[in-house]
Amino acid sequence: MKFPKYPSYKNSDVEWLGGVPEHWDILPTKRFFRLTAESAPNNNDFELLSIYTDIGVRPRKDLEARGNRASTTDGYWLVKKGDLIVNKLLAWMGAIGMSDYDGVTSPAYDILRQVKPLNPKYYHYLFRCGICFTEFRKYSRGIMDMRLRLYFDQLGQLPMPFPPKVEQTAIANFLDAETSKIDALVAEQRRLIELLKEKRQAVISHAVTKGLNPNAPMKDSGIEWLGDVPEHWTLTRIKHLADGFMYGTSSDCNQEDEGTPVLRIPNIKDGYVDFTDLKYANFSTEDEDRYILSENDILVVRTNGNPQLVGKSAIFTSQCKCIFASYLIKIQPRPNVVPAYLNLVMNASCTREMLTLSARTSAGNYNMNCEGLGRTYVILPPLTEQWEILTYLEARVRTFDQLQAEAEKAIELLQERCTALISAAVTGKIDVRGYAAQETA
């Protein structure tokens, strides 16, 4: 849908804002919001609220994974529905938004309350818009990005558009409706991606446990989670398919661009190594020789706070010189298995489930050692059949990956449209005053 522009514009004299509708005011933020700091009473049971960069203000109890419940909220700031909560440290990244709830929040946050008649939802959209982030960052104070803070004495001076309240409401209602539509489309694409991942895993698991010939004679594997397998396949343990298991280096590898690249957990994706986020370290010749990776080595995640990630593996197919970190285990496949096939088997859902079960909990992390990895059973076809299955799966997986990439691109485009629509509406680049009439017509 194409939206009209306003009949006439004026220069806002604000560089980032540009021209605005002629009848809009431009006011310092402190002219319509004030900083408030009402302390909650002792022994209160008010809703504890937090502000997040991605989802705005939410009750902490609904998102326990994102932070611990405070032992007490005595002395916390009171929040009223319609107030704006500002995380001074992360405002320039989007941690600012309107509260739909009465409650309390941390004294580390600022609470903004309106002093003029306005629609706070309009400013929720405006302040969470990318063009504002740049201004928030510019006026934040601190010696480095991670220490930048946007105090109200700076935020309050920033000039912002102030349309008539009825127009603010029209813009907010328009954006509520349009972003809801876009969110629904994004959710649909995300469901598609999850279905593709499930189907991909099902195809891989079936191929590496049942083979490609539906008429092949079957036998009981003797392993509950494997069930019946082709009669001519061999039940074996991973340790019989590898010449060795090895933990990676524990050396500090936080350098950005000097030394030897070190592969870490974030580099281990769904069966492949991602080289887009490399860290580096300097090693002695002896350590470099010890931890250097060879083509067709398999790297396995051995520890993580998420048990579902323990056992995730990737095959190293690069010619470049790389070392691997201590949270990974290196496997060197033997000649009796095709390395890429073993990598598929290890990433199959049935194998991953067994590796997850073998992990032990310690200090909030799930850990798997070389012994547990080596003891894990897999079913192995003859080499010629490994190649056949590998060729078949590479083609099927490629199709799934293409479909997933298309869905991810669709999400990216939808999110870009959403961002552009919000920016255009809150800055008056499009006129949405007639939107409600069109919707009810």
Image: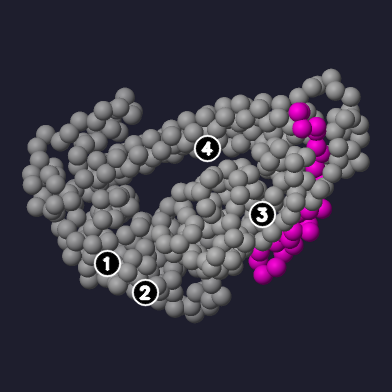
- Please give left or right for residue 8 compared with residue 97 in the image: left
Q: Amino acid at mark 2?
A: Glu
| Most foreground residue, 375 or 251 | 251
Name the N-terminal-most of marks 2 and 3: 2
For the residues labelled 1 and 3, say whether their Cβ atoms are less than 8 Å apart.
Answer: no
Give the distance between the C-alpha atoms of the residues marked 2 and 1, in whole angstroms: 24 Å
369 magenta-colored: yes
| Residue 410 sits in quarter | top left
| Residue 51 sits in quarter | bottom left
Q: Is residue 404 above or below residue 120?
A: above
| Most foreground residue, 243 or 111 | 243
Q: Is residue 306 above or below residue 218?
A: below
Identify residue for label 2: 38
Q: Nearer the viewer, mark 2 or mark 1?
A: 1
From the top left corner, tell me how far across and down residue 330 is, in percent: 66, 54
Identify residue for label 3: 330
Q: Amino acid at mark 4?
A: Arg
State the extent of the magenta-drawn residues as a range: 357-385
Give the distance between the C-alpha atoms of the residues marked 4 and 1, in whole angstroms: 35 Å
